[in-house]
Image (tube, helix red, strand yellow):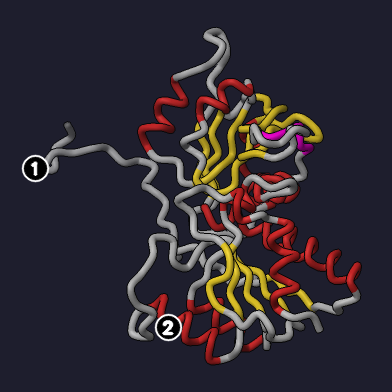
Amino acid sequence: MPALSEVLTALDALWPPERAEQWDAVGTVCGDPDAPVGRVLFAVDPVQEIADEAVRLGADLLVTHHPLYLRGTTTVAAGTFKGRVVHTLIKHDIALHVAHTNADTADPGVSDALAGALDLRVLGPLVPDASDPEGRRGLGRVCELTHPMKLSEFGPYAAARLPATAQGVRIAGDPDRVIRKVAVSGGSGDSLFDHVRAAEVDAFLTADLRHHPASEATQTARPAEAIPPALLDAAHWATEWPWCEQAAAQLDEISDRHGWGLRTYVSRTVTDPWTAHAASATDFTPTNTTGAPR
């Protein structure tokens, strides 16, 4: 079996830490560089359920997309939930490695995996990485559907192709609009609307769309005569989970090439924080405090 340091070198080649955003916290959180690695688990979130799953699996390395300590800390005491994760992993000789924004902009990256889950053909990055001479790296992806769909069809199609969550997929736009060209961005994407408009896509699928940016996006088009893009807002976890399968496959290829014999696993534990959804009443009429219609 390879040493942890060898596996981490391979992971850093896939997702170089220097390509992470300055505010990000990527890389190895815990682990003995000389420890042997035979089993690797991939997951989105380094939460206790995932740490426990890694223990049950007998994993030697846990690779997550989201950082455990994004804003730093002064304690890893087991009385805190993040400290308990660290204690669980160290107690069972499990290393933790994070690939976050350096995996977002990689080639292939998080949005390539999202496009693959939706069976979209990738045309290029939504926000190209200026340091990439080939123009393949960058944030988000601009894609084409294999065949056009109405928005009323594409929304349910996307919901069915992504992992199930309480949220599902929220949709904004004309149900009869024909969707041919789509921008996708795994994770929070409402900072990318200018790029989405510039790409002149029919729809934008991402996560964590806030009220004001989404409202403005549905009213703003570029060029002026174009129709604003339809919006599809999926759960953050659901848009990034496909990367785990892609990442595991990439490590499998490296393992085969080196004869390491690694066994890779992808967690199917749903760590999206929302657990239920209550549909709004279809006949709701706003009322004042006296109960009379406004």
Pick whichever, 242 or 150, lies toward us: 242
Foreground mark, 1 or 2, reads 2
Residue under circle 1?
Answer: 290
270 falls in the magenta region: no
> Where is residue 246 shown, x and y percent of the image?
74, 58
CA neighbours of label 2 inside 10 A, class few (<14), some (14 to 19), many (20+): some
Q: Secondary structure at mark 1?
A: loop
Q: Alpha-carbon neighbours of circle 1 within 10 Å: few (<14), some, or many (≥20)?
A: few
- The foreground one among 270 and 20 is 20
Residue 174 appears anywhere in the view: no
User: Is residue 65 among the parts visible in the rendering?
Assistant: yes
In the rendered image of this protein, does residue 131 appear above or below residue 259? above
Q: Main secondary structure of the magenta part?
A: strand
Q: Amino acid at mark 1?
A: Thr
Q: Residue furthest top?
A: 225
> Residue, x 58% and y 29% (percent of image)?
175
Residue situated in front as seen by the camera: 58 or 224: 58
Side (left or right) of 91 relative to 243? left
Q: Identify the residue at horizontal 65%, vertical 50% (top origin).
A: 110
The residue at which mark 2 appears reads as 84
What residue range appears in magenta? 121-125
- Helix, strand or loop for disc 2: helix
Residue nearest the viewer, comparing 6 with 57: 6
In three-dimensional space, the C-alpha distance between marks 1 and 2, rounded to whole angstroms, equals 50 Å
- Residue 65: horizontal and vertical position, in percent? 58, 61
Q: Earlier in the sequence, mark 1 or mark 2?
A: 2
Name the residue at 75% across, 65% down.
10
State which quadrant residue 265 falls in. Answer: bottom right
- Quarter of the image where one finds residue 183: top right
Please identify the quadrant where the N terminus is shown: bottom right
